[in-house]
Amino acid sequence: MKTIELSPKSSFIADLNLRDLQRLREVCRRVFREKCNGRSLTNTQCDKWIESMGPKVMEKRIKIAVDTKMVE
């Protein structure tokens, strides 16, 4: 069984299934790498970014990422 590493103050991301959380983290990492000269983020850093955007924005990001084949 896989465990999900979440930042301590998680709220809506705790309700995401593992696949959607992994998708969001991948989108977050890709965007950050492109904008910040290849630097990478930890899961906790990704979770903070995801949390800051809120559930409605993240739902749209997952849909766009899947539709454009950015993630599976």
Image (tube, rainbow, N blue to C red):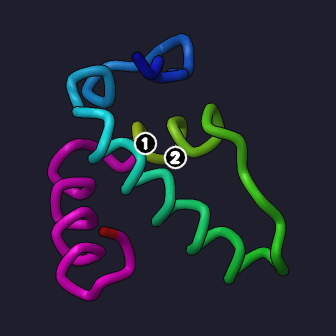
Name the residue located 55 percent from the left edge and 11 percent from the top edge.
8
Q: Is residue 63 magenta?
A: yes
Residue furthest top as drawn: 8
Q: Position of residue 10 (x, y in %)?
A: 41, 19
User: Could you tell me the amino acid type at mark 1?
Assistant: Ser
Q: Do the residues labelled 2 and 1 touch (CB within 8 Å)?
A: yes
Residue 6, image x and y in percent? 51, 21
Measured as percent of width and height from the top left, residue 53 is found at 36, 49
- Is 6 inside the magenta-drawn segment? no
Vertical relation: 18 (above or below) 71:
above
Q: In this view, does 37 lie to the left or right of 42?
A: right
Of residues 23 and 9, which is closer to you in this image? 23
Q: Residues within 10 Å of mark 2 (few under 14, many from 20)?
A: some
Q: What stretch is highlighted in magenta?
A: 52-71
Which sits in the foreground, 66 or 64? 66
Tell me the residue at 23%/33% (across/down). 17
Q: Name the residue under label 1.
A: 52
Circle 2 sits on which residue?
49
Q: What residue type is labelled 2?
A: Trp
In the rendered view of the protein, which quadrant contains the C terminus?
bottom left
Q: In this view, does 3 lie above or below 53?
A: above
